[in-house]
Amino acid sequence: MEPTVRTATPDDVEAIAAIYDDQVRHSVATFDLEPPDPQTWQEKVAARGTGHHVLVCEIDDAVRGFAYATTYRPRLGYDRTREVSVYLAGDARGRGVGRALYDELLGRLRTDGVHTVLAVVAQPNEASEALHRACGFERTGVLPEVGRKQGRWVDVAFWALVLDGD
Ligand SMILES: CC(C)(COP(=O)(O)OP(=O)(O)OC[C@H]1O[C@@H](n2cnc3c(N)ncnc32)[C@H](O)[C@@H]1OP(=O)(O)O)[C@@H](O)C(=O)NCCC(=O)NCCS
């Protein structure tokens, strides 16, 4: 069945948490060191509105990935910038699901009047960098050794996409 992208609902939180927690435990894609309280995801899902979206992708009626947009920094001058993140279950990778989630998410952010979208990619992550490049993001720089996980210092690359609009 074709992957379907839709807005996340409270019923999706368990699946979202399972996908995310696996990355917390086994990768540096996120700098969380412990799985967050599921309430964190409930709040993100409930907080949806202009410039704040949590989307899931279903394959064969099961949530296999999600993407979301959050505030970049709380100060008001940053209000038309958003940071995006995307996580898929292992068996959903490499078949266009990340792209489908981002196409929908970026479309919604454009409609919302968001001007710039940022992604922060812990190094190395070839798949994530390829996805962001494919979606039109540009790699704007690397912050050296700002994260520590799995017993090593980790660089992060910033990727930016300026959407249409003033
Ligand atoms: C990163 C991730 C979201 C990418 O999603 P995906 O569904 O696998 O990517 P897609 O199949 O949509 O591919 C998008 C583009 O990336 C390329 N790509 C995907 N996986 C790749 C890989 N492992 N190596 C090189 N290129 C890759 C595809 O060829 C495609 O490029 P194209 O449009 O020019 O052909 C997914 O691999 C994932 O969830 N990884 C673990 C969590 C993670 O790292 N999240 C990102 C945190 S910053």
Image (cartoon, helix red, strand yellow):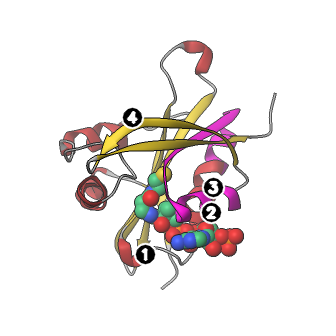
Q: Which residue is mark 2?
A: 130
Q: Quick one: label 2 or label 1, which is nearer the N terminus? A: 1
Q: Secondary structure at mark 2?
A: helix
Q: Secondary structure at mark 4?
A: loop
Can residue 113 be seen from the camera position used here? no
Q: Which residue is mark 4?
A: 47
Q: Position of residue 100 (x, y in %)?
A: 58, 65
Q: Position of residue 83 (x, y in %)?
A: 53, 38
Q: Which image quadrant: the C terminus?
A: top right
Q: Residue 86 vs residue 22: left or right?
A: right
Q: Would the CB of label 3 be found within 8 Å of ligand 1?
A: yes
Q: Would the CB of label 2 be found within 8 Å of ligand 1?
A: yes
- Give the distance between the C-alpha atoms of the residues marked 2 and 1, in whole angstroms: 16 Å
Q: For residue 124: magenta?
A: yes
Q: Quick one: label 3 or label 1, which is nearer the N terminus? A: 1
* Residue ID at (48%, 51%): 123
Q: Label 1 neighbourhood size at 10 Å, few (<14), some (14-19), many (20+)?
A: some
Which sits in the foreground, 9 or 39? Answer: 39
